[in-house]
Image (cartoon, grey):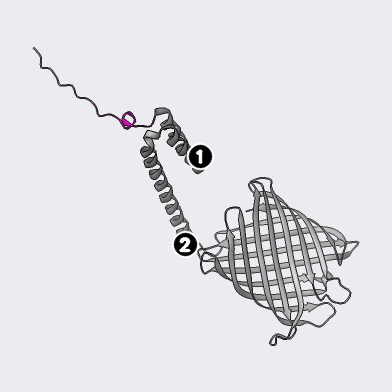
Amino acid sequence: MGEIQPVVESAPTAEEVSNIPGGVRAMINAAMATNDKGKIETVLALARQAAPHGEEEVKAIETAWRADVAEKARLAREAETNKIRKAGLFELWSGEGQLGGFQASGNSNNIGLSAGLKLKRQGLDWSHSLRATADYQRSNGVTSREQFLFAYEPRYQVKDELFVYGLAQYERNKLQGFTGRYAISGGVGYQVANSGDLKLSVKAGPALRVTNFTVEEDETRLAALFGVDFDWKIAERLSFTQDANMVTETGGQATVIVDSSRTTLNLVSGLDAKVSDRLRSRITYAVDYDSKPPEGKVSTDTVTRLTLVYDF
């Protein structure tokens, strides 16, 4: 007679001892596979209601998932930090180029061509931005509009919201009465809001501005600069931008502050509509105000631009 072999029972699997029904667990696994945070959180909340006796298990699953997400985020930040540290001067730049037309009123009433370029490099503490725009029209051999702007602004992030900035800017606009306007400024700024859909920062500081007028004597004056940058993502494919710089000059020369002599304001409002991942259509309305325009010029110039913008 053969020996009777003992029956060895296999240990129950986690699913067999789980208080979470198989259908609910399958729903959780399917949500986890999507890596969609919102979907996963929704499914876990529903799982607690569908399987109240398995609440502790659901909680353990959620804790493990959140720990995994946090670790992946930490590794991604570490990799990005190392990438920035090792990057050369000409690396990590991003930007946009735009080309289109404009309609102007004020010192001139015409339509013409507009082009622009923006470049930005974001480092760990430092960021650098370059901005250039050009409006030009020539009719019957006569240049009726010629406006150029170039600006370079480095920033150093002191804390999460507080930063210091520098600014070097050149403008040329004969219709407003100057062949060149040079400004150098530095000061402090504050990031008032910085969420995914809303960004708002303000800045202020002293400035030195040199203006080469077309008919008047050149001026070199101390000034105070105030700036506002505002970006709002209204919808998935629609965003609003608002950039404003106000400069108030002193009444004296570069070394003396007497009283307010001239205030200029540059206000640019824009609405972007996303066409594709890299292409956007943009309409902007710009206001240039000079409280003390040269003789024969008006105080306010407005320009409406319609352009196509390509991100790179």
186 vs 67, nearest the viewer: 67
- At 45% from the left and 38% from the top, the residue drawn is 44
159 and 212: which is toward the camera? 159
Indicate the amino acid at tag 1. Answer: Lys
Which dot, 1 or 2, sits closer to the camera?
1
**Which residue sits furthest top?**
1
Q: Is mark 1 on a helix, strand or loop?
A: helix
Q: Which of marks 1 and 2 is nearer the N terminus?
A: 1
Q: How would you classify the magenta stretch by its main secondary structure? A: loop
Asked if residue 113 is positioned above or below residue 216 in the image, the reply reads above
The alpha-carbon separation of the residues under discs 1 and 2 comes to 37 Å
Segment colored magenta? 10-20
The amino acid type of the residue labelled 2 equals Lys
Q: Position of residue 76 (x, y in %)?
A: 45, 53
User: How many other residues sit within 10 Å of disc 1, few (<14), some (14-19) or many (≥20)?
Assistant: some
Q: What element carries label 2?
A: helix
Residue at mark 1: 39
Locate residue 173, reporting x and y percent.
79, 70
Tell me: 137 left or right of 206: right
Report if residue 69 lies within the magenta region. Answer: no
> Which residue position holds label 2?
86
Which residue is drawn at the image coordinates 38% and 32% (left, top)?
Answer: 20
Q: Where is residue 112 in the image (x, y as percent from the top left)?
A: 83, 58
Q: In the picture, residue 251 is in which quadrant?
A: bottom right
**Would residue 16 be counted in the magenta stretch?**
yes
